[in-house]
Image: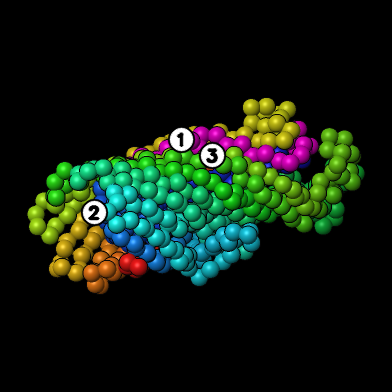
Amino acid sequence: MNPIVYRVSYLLSVVVGLWVDIATAQLSQNLTIGNPKAMALGNAITADSSGIDAVHYNPAALTKLKGRQIAIKLVTGVLDIRSEFKAPENYGNSFFGLSDDPVANTSSRTTTSTMYFPGLGGATNVPVLFAPLAGISITPPGSKFTFANNIYAPQALGYSRDDNDSARYQGKQVAIQRITYFSPSVAYQVNDELSVGLSVGFSHQALYLNEDFRAPGVLTGFTGAAQDALCTVDGNPFEVLLNICGGDLGPFTDIANIDLDLQQSLSPTWNVGFLWEPVDWFAWGAVYQSEAKMKLKGKYNVSYSDDWQGFWQGLDSSLVGAVFSTITPDGLFDNERGNVSLDLTYPAHFSTGIKVNPIPKWQVNFDVKWTDYAAWNEFEIKFDRELDILTIASLLSPDNATPTSLILDRGYKSVWSWALGLQYQYNDRLTLRMGYEPRPSAIPGNKADVLAPIGDATLYGLGAGYQWDKDTVIDVGFNYLVSKQNIPAGSSCSINCSSIDGLVYNPYADLDVESTVKAYVFALTYRTTF
């Protein structure tokens, strides 16, 4: 078992873990904007008025706001993430008969949320996700223009697992967050039927990942079996030639912990939309939200376990270790840290929809949407210096590595989806709403895992709007989202393959994995004139 293979495999696993974490975007898309009306209508809002949050949903709808208006928003939510790891019949065959996996036939659950606070770095555990947000709009008297600015969170998702949680090998503490802190916007009322709008968003993007690492597979299974045979109470008879008894290094050994913290303070995007209302009972709208190309920068830190260090210290003291040290003259470290960057594209999004009032008091909204997750076909992670590990990796896999970077092909797919909303005008003041939005996963089945545990999802919405007085509207909205996935053993080489080249990255090799994510999100908006 070559130490180079392990070190290259571990570094590749860092990239896999980082990239998969980004994929949580599909789960959180439009989930944390904080617009109660959109939430209640299942996000079928493109052809409807969404208040100051039209900056995001469709800037053309800002023309619905007259005079000077301000909105204060409160968004809060809880994630309930559960996973089960089941050992099928003959579990352990790939590990030379070793089957004493402490993770096998256990379950994982977390409801602990995390948030990334810009300027502080890292992920902070919080009882619930919580975000006070606000926006403002101004329509000058007699003008066809409406100007607005809004603070909102297009993406805010994070969780934390306990130190002994079975799922800690794919996300111990995770946060992905995009906060749009400045969004100058303008809408123009072309005529009584048509409005157009444009908004430019300046956002802070953050990505944080901390996870433990292990590598069950054929190589570690062979090492563990050899240790069981040679490392006896009477000592190792081949210690001078090959000392593998300095520390456990079997398929279920904790090897290391990885910590990644990346961010970009200024990431611009733009949204352009139109709204056409030819009659009072029908409207059609569309919006295009641009992609954002980013270079996230930050720090990485890898801490190796005592077993990992002890194993290599023992090996280095033997004849075989002397040979290995000529290949890795700098030796093995208990800790590695430095600067790292990631080229990342925030995917473009398109939505179009209609609003229809088929009978008095009733309104139906229907949207069709597309998100360009195919932009996540390839990712490149760059280090601030040439690393021996990367130099070796570039020789072994020139398509995926250079001395200063790693390139990972992923093959995610762009997805189409739809949403349906229903609204009932109970009386002149009270409006009741409900919605439904199925969300197909952008992750192919052979890339599924529990770091981004997002299979196909379904979102349900409920809410109400209340006209407090002629100038003030209060909206409340609630979303319940559920996503489930089943990953049979060996079906995804992002979690449970056990092939000899499957160290990247399959911490639950040969286990059947099931996961469920439930999200509960509540929002309240107070909008009034000033």
Residue 132 appears in the figure = yes
The front one of 513 and 114 is 114
Q: Is residue 368 visible?
A: no
Q: Which residue is tagged 1? A: 374
In the displayed structure, does residue 246 sit left or right of residue 150?
A: right
Amino acid type for the residue under numbered disc 1: Ala
Quote the CA–CA distance across marks 2 and 1. 28 Å
Question: Is 314 left, or right, of 45 in this rendering?
Answer: right
Q: Residue furthest bottom?
A: 468
Q: Residue at x 63, y 59 (%)?
A: 119
The residue shown at (45%, 52%) is 183
In percent of width and height, residue 480 lies at: 34, 60
Residue 42, image x, y percentages: 29, 54
**What residue is pinned by disc 2?**
421
Residue 293 disc label: 3
The percent coordinates of residue 30 (x first, y second) are 39, 53
User: Crowding at label 2, few (<14), some or many (≥20) Cα neighbours within 10 Å?
Assistant: many
Using residue 160 as the reference point, say whether residue 69 is left or right of it: left
**Tag nearer the camera, 2 or 3:** 3
Q: Earlier in the sequence, mark 2 or mark 1?
A: 1
Q: Callout 1: 10 Å neighbours few (<14), some, many (20+)?
A: some
Which amino acid lies under the numbered mark 3 shown in the image of this protein?
Lys
| Along the viewing direction, whichever of 308 and 424 lies nearer the viewer | 424
Which one is earlier in the sequence, the residue at label 2 or at label 3? 3
Name the quadrant of the C terminus: bottom left
